Amino acid sequence: MHGARFDRRRFLQSSLLGASSIALTGCDVFDGATDPQSTLRTVFEAASGLTYRSQRLLGGAHTLAPEYTKADIRQTQHPNGSVLPDAEDYLEMARDNFASFKLAIEGLVARPTTFSREALLAMPARTQITRHDCVEGWSCIAEWTGVPLGMVLDQARPKTNARYVVFHCYDVIERSLSGAITYYESIDMIDAYHPQTILAYGLNGAALPIANGAPLRVRVERQLGYKMAKFVHTIELAESLTHLGLGKGSYWADRGYEWYAGI
Ligand SMILES: Nc1nc2c(c(=O)[nH]1)N[C@H]1C(S)=C(S)[C@@H](COP(=O)(O)O)O[C@H]1N2
Ligand SMILES: [Mo]
């Protein structure tokens, strides 16, 4: 057992170069990576596929991310990326403390469902103290409370051909001549049903602040920060990711980062 662990670490360190050592600067766009012909992009894709396959291969389905104690919480969760969506429907909801918030589950489900805020709060909750690692190089340990994503999905009854869980968010992450792009992310069914994957509405014992994704944000503890979509309003089950954005399944994956951002 001990030997197997050591080998796993050594294997990940020596042969994979990990997600973080290849990712260059952080959450800012870097030039060149969106060009489908770019070598940089090819390198990213190869590394991403390798990380994904090796994590899944090496018993990855059930391993837990490390959890910490309250004493390890040394600072507030550093807000990053969007900190306040400017959509009018969002702001209206925020003024009323998100009382009218509804989460929709759609796509490849037998029973498309919406959850009110009260319904989500009434479901069994999980609280976990974990470390958030941003690809930019900073980390924060914080206590997150929310409902396990798997429980929410079960109520909508995912169809057997559903392979991915897509998160659609309120915030516009980019505006260009061709229009506004709202943040989107996706994970596979293994991470969706992982026990530490929650839809969080609480942070460090209080209601989730707007800057950290209120009223509801994803925690996928074995991956980097950009996978943890904030301001989620709709969850879509899908068989492929090609219909989304530029086809890589995530706003940042479409800009050169790994879709599977394992840590
Ligand atoms: N909707 C949305 N989710 C998002 C982002 C964003 O800009 N919009 N940024 C991501 C990035 S890069 C990080 S590091 C974390 C930051 O979460 P925090 O603000 O709670 O620290 O949210 C992720 N989820
Ligand atoms: Mo990030």
Image (cartoon, grey):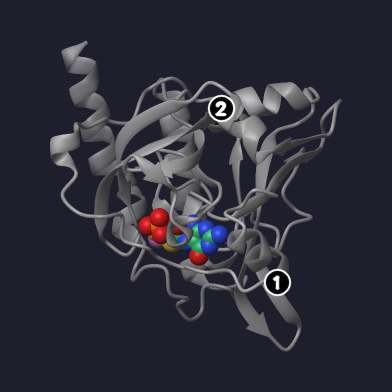
> Callout 1 environment at 10 Å: few (<14), some (14 to 19), or many (20+)?
few
* 142 up-or-down from 83: above or below: above
- The spot of residue 177 in percent (x, y) is 73, 89
Q: Is residue 80 visible?
A: yes
- The spot of residue 72 in percent (x, y) is 15, 40
Q: Viewed as shown, does residue 6 lie left or right of 237?
A: left
Residue beneath disc 2: 190
| Mark 2 element type | helix
Residue that sits furthest to the top in the current view? 1
Report the quarter where the N terminus lies: top left
Residue beneath disc 1: 88
- Which amino acid type is marked by label 1? Glu
Q: Are marks 2 and 1 in contact (CB under 8 Å)?
A: no
Quarter of image, res 90: bottom right
- The spot of residue 146 in percent (x, y) is 48, 34
Quarter of image, res 106: top right
Q: Is residue 44 visible?
A: no
Q: Viewed as shown, does residue 128 lie left or right of 178?
A: left
* 33 up-or-down from 74: above or below: below
- The spot of residue 222 in percent (x, y) is 39, 37
Residue at horizontal 68 percent and vertical 28 percent from the top: 153
Residue at horizontal 76 percent and vertical 83 percent from the top: 178
> Callout 2 environment at 10 Å: few (<14), some (14 to 19), or many (20+)?
some
Residue at horizontal 70 percent and vertical 21 percent from the top: 154
Tell me which label, 2 or 1, sits earlier in the chain.
1
What is the number of the mark on residue 256? none
Q: Quadrant of ligand 2?
A: bottom left
